[in-house]
Image (cartoon, rainbow, N blue to C red):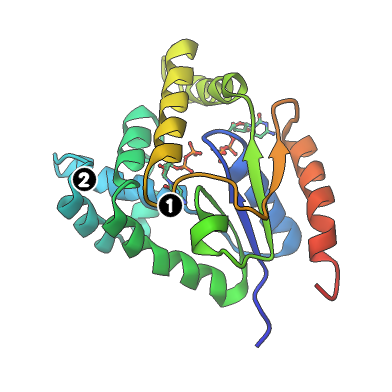
Amino acid sequence: PVRPLIIAIDGPAAAGKGTLARRLATHLGLPYLDTGLLYRAVGRRVLDAGADPNDPAIAAAAARALVPGDLTRDDLRGPPADAAASAVATIPSVRAALLEFQRGFGRARGAVLDGRDIGTVVFPDATAKLFVTASPEARGRRRWLELQQRGVAAELAVVTAEVRARDAADAARATAPMKPAADAMLLDTTDLDPDGAFAAALQLLRPLLAPGN
Ligand code: CDP
Ligand code: CDP
């Protein structure tokens, strides 16, 4: 059977992964999966139950109980959901419960997936892997602007500190830490807008997407 086309996009918070992944998926005619939504939805379920997102048994049960409607909730963004997602994401049984869903999604028709461990754990044999970064200052500002646009009052310094803290936790955890795969191509979007990042990504991907590859 022909191997499905898998584009893995990893990197820290607000690097521009989702924006880029969505555009690449449209361009290539592939389905797109924002894997962060899975962890956010698990964290949300635990918070709704009034429980601690660091509790392995409760978080794993929440992961196994996920239904598609959980991923379209409108309360998956913002500081409480960010922190809860990052907490449940450290729990091996939570990651194991979400792994098969991600693999099944990609295997069906190929896909662009973005997250932290797509190129290292979920699809180590992906067709192409991008690790998208930007300076912590640029990423903090992007998250802060998003909150402003949603009418959420927040201080730039606080938002930037939260982004840094979550990146540090995601990179330091024992299970599936955020890190570039050995064969990932790096894309720094600090000085790129979404159009610029898309053009740069296409440039990087071109050799791997060429016919015959
Ligand atoms: O998925 P990830 O958290 O990595 O980032 P995103 O949600 O794609 O982008 C975070 C914010 O930065 C969005 O509001 C984007 O419009 C913005 N952005 C940007 O300013 N420049 C880029 N090259 C990419 C995204
Ligand atoms: O949009 P942003 O980049 O801020 O975060 P996200 O991609 O929605 O991911 C939220 C959290 O889920 C991350 O901080 C990670 O702790 C976790 N996550 C993960 O561990 N593995 C993934 N493949 C995706 C997200």
Report helix, strand or loop for mark 1. Answer: loop
Amino acid type for the residue under numbered disc 2: Val
83 in relation to 213, above or below: above
Question: Residue 129 lies in what quarter of the image?
Answer: bottom right
Q: What residue does disc 2 label?
A: 46
Sort mark 2 into few (<14), some (14-19) or many (20+) by Cα contacts within 10 Å.
Answer: many
* Label 1, label 2: how far apart the Cα atoms are: 21 Å
Question: Residue 169 lies in what quarter of the image?
Answer: top left
Q: What residue does disc 1 label?
A: 176
Residue at (64% x, 30% y) in the render = 134
| Quarter of the rendered structure image containing ligand 2 | top left
Sort mark 1 into few (<14), some (14-19) or many (20+) by Cα contacts within 10 Å.
Answer: many
Residue 49: image location, x then y, percent? 15, 44
Is 75 displayed left or right of 60 in the figure?
Answer: right
Amino acid type for the residue under numbered disc 1: Ala
The reply to whether residue 33 is visible in this rendering is: no
**Ligand 2 neighbours mark 1 (CB distance < 8 Å):** yes
Residue at (52% x, 23% y) in the render = 149
Residue at (75% x, 57% y) in the render = 27
Residue 7: image location, x then y, percent? 65, 60
Residue at (46% x, 26% y) in the render = 163
The reply to whether residue 63 is visible in this rendering is: yes
Residue 182: image location, x then y, percent? 63, 53
